[in-house]
Amino acid sequence: MKDIFVLIEHRRGEMRDVSIEMLCGAAGLGGTVVAVLLGKDVDAFAEKAAGYADKVLYVNDPMFENYNSEAYQKALSALIKEHNPGLVLIGNTAQGIDLAPALAVELGAPLVTDVTALEMEGDKPKPTRQFYGGKLDAHMVMKDADLYILTVREATFQAGEPSKSGEIVKVENPVKEEITYRKFVEYVEPEVGEVDITQSTMLVGVGRGIREDKNLPIVEELAKVLGADLAASRAVVDAGWLPADRQVGISGKTVKPKLYLAVGISGAFQHVTGMKGSEVIVAINKDPDAPIFGIADYGIVDDLFKVVPKLTEKIKELKGL
Amino acid sequence: MNMVVCVKRVPDTAEAEVHIDASGKDIEKSRLSFKINECDNYAVEEAIQIKERLGGTVTVISLGPKENDEVIRMALAKGGDEAIRLEDEAFAGGDGFAVAKALAAAIKGMEFDIVFTGALADDDGYAVVPAALGELLGVPHATYVKKVEILEDGKRARVGRELEGGLLEFLEIDLPCVLGIQTGINEPRYASFKGIKQAAKKEIAVKSAADLGVDASEVGEAGSWAVLEKFTPPVVGEMAEILEGDPEETAAKLAAILKEKGLV
Ligand SMILES: Cc1cc2nc3c(=O)[nH]c(=O)nc-3n(C[C@H](O)[C@H](O)[C@H](O)COP(=O)(O)OP(=O)(O)OC[C@H]3O[C@@H](n4cnc5c(N)ncnc54)[C@H](O)[C@@H]3O)c2cc1C
Ligand SMILES: Nc1ncnc2c1ncn2[C@@H]1O[C@H](COP(=O)(O)O)[C@@H](O)[C@H]1O
């Protein structure tokens, strides 16, 4: 078995959990696990990765202070050509998905994205991923090759305790030329609104099932009697029905309230990532196959327009309102 | 600005039951409705808005059967100028890479400043096409794009990519380029009645693999990085306890549970 490269992802002084998860997952595949770290003065990440890897290839250069697909692709393709790994794992993140397909095309390496489970057949990965917003698992057969690339969904592998002490090898930046066609400019934080849903003890999450913004009072009323704040899926925010600071999920907020009541939300993993840590999860959805029921504690399979007003009524009664 | 927009027609499965068909490699589609891929709708809007601001043309491309004309015509009705549909048996079963190769072959000879795609297809969810297409065309790319501003000289763009937590990463990128558009970047318009009537008359150029000069082994299943072996229902953890009854009963049960848990 050839080496397995795992790309360490970090941003603004923080290393992403998926990096450690992938190192742990790779450790079970047989083969030397090599963490690849591109960054500027990120020695702490090199040390952290070394706890989970057999070796860390660390390129310390100002070019890698912030992610830039041009710089990353050039550096990675050079390192891959030099070290000849059999498998490269990259996080299926906003960074990974901007990088991996172009890298795979350049290297002529088969790529499967958003992998949610992985087996090996000898040197060849047999990945599973999802289709139709999580409604089906797809078992993929990759084309035979010397090098495979996978982007791995967060939480696919479990991060364990550090158990290795890989050698940290500082390598010279293989990118000699200047970065020309794509330049990092700045990060801009999302706007903060009046309610910080990450602090709410109870949330009523509303999804596209609400149909139109004029129907929002139904859930607003429920939230009011519960003493909850309103949260939303991305679909609701994209439609402009609720402000962006209410969005729960991978590109929104991560919330951990005592109660998360999902109304008309399908439960795409991008949403679930942001609310699965809630203490009690309840879902109201008319589709019995909606993935949200796989994460909820309690579910009602019915039309929200019938159930929600009733629920509001019942809670009012209980509260003596 | 000369722009190309890649649009996919996908089944609407958000609220529908999804059944694996007899082959195990596809779903039963006869009872599903179809629509434009969600983020492609935003990509069309972005291209048309730029055309309205700066002038230029918008060419719509879709790979797929005749039924795709429906989504192509809607994009034309909103302000697209020309349209190409790629259709060939050789394209069947292709993954994002195979699709990107066919799209690249169609786009290569054109003069373009920006190729817009969606960030990800709602059905396969590969999110491969934007970055792969950029590499195949030999131009820079950026995906998960939530802001586009063409800079003064028309040779560069300031682009905001949406990262985890909603953080925007701004970069400057040389044109021509490929941009993968994320939902919510704009407010997609509805086509006007007049637009729809005009679009109905427009010609959609249909091109085969041979027309594009691509070998059948390069596209479809043969040209893919990976092919589907089979679908299976997803492995779900412990399913929710489903409360049974009519709305009156389920609401009462849920209210009682919430009370018992001290949440009410
Ligand atoms: C890079 C990326 C980042 C993303 N980030 C996020 C994120 O941070 N947060 C997020 O939420 N999404 C995110 N998404 C989008 C995500 O993939 C889904 O598209 C989105 O979560 C869907 O929202 P929804 O569940 O409201 O809508 P849909 O998926 O359309 O679901 C609507 C649901 O309502 C139900 N319904 C309809 N009518 C009724 C009724 N009358 N009664 C009861 N139920 C009804 C339907 O059965 C369906 O399950 C992201 C996507 C990408 C590609
Ligand atoms: N068959 C197709 N025809 C035209 N464009 C496509 C097709 N498939 C994918 N695309 C484009 O590529 C984007 C990403 O698709 P994917 O890589 O499959 O997730 C989509 O949003 C479309 O813009």
Image: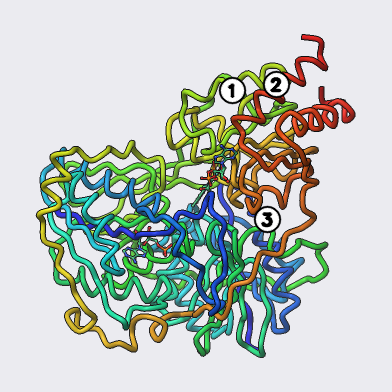
Query: Does B14 appear above or below B139?
Result: above
Q: Secondary structure at mark 2?
A: helix
Question: Dot 2 falls on which chain?
Answer: A
Q: Residue at x 72, y 67 (%)?
A: A50
Query: Mark 1 is on which residue type?
Result: Ile
Query: Mark 2 is on which residue type?
Result: Thr
Extreme residue in the front direction: B246
Query: Does B237 appear above or below A54?
Result: above
Real-space Cα separation, disc 1 to disc 3, in angstroms = 38 Å
Q: Please state the horizontal and vertical placement of residue A175, each as a whole percent of the image.
A: 41, 70
Q: Residue at x 61, y 48 (%)?
A: A287
Query: Mark 3 is on which residue type?
Result: Asp
Mark whose residue sits in front, 1 or 3? 1
Q: Nearer the viewer, residue B181 or A293?
A: A293
Q: Residue at x 50, y 72 (%)?
A: B26
Q: Secondary structure at mark 1?
A: helix
For the residues labelled 1 and 2, say whether their Cβ atoms are less than 8 Å apart: yes
The residue identified by callout 3 is A17
Q: Nearer the viewer, residue A170 or A124?
A: A124
First reached walking from the N terminus: tag 1 or tag 2? 1
First reached walking from the N terminus: tag 3 or tag 2? 3
Task: Classify mark 3: residues with Cα within 10 Å, few (<14), some (14-19) or many (20+).
Answer: some
- Image check: A4 left or right of B153? right
- Image check: B200 left or right of A202? left
Regarding residue A15, the answer to whether it shows in the image is no
Ligand 1 positioned in quadrant: top right
First reached walking from the N terminus: tag 1 or tag 3? 3
The residue identified by callout 1 is A218
The residue identified by callout 2 is A312
Q: Secondary structure at mark 3?
A: helix
Give residue A61's mark.
none
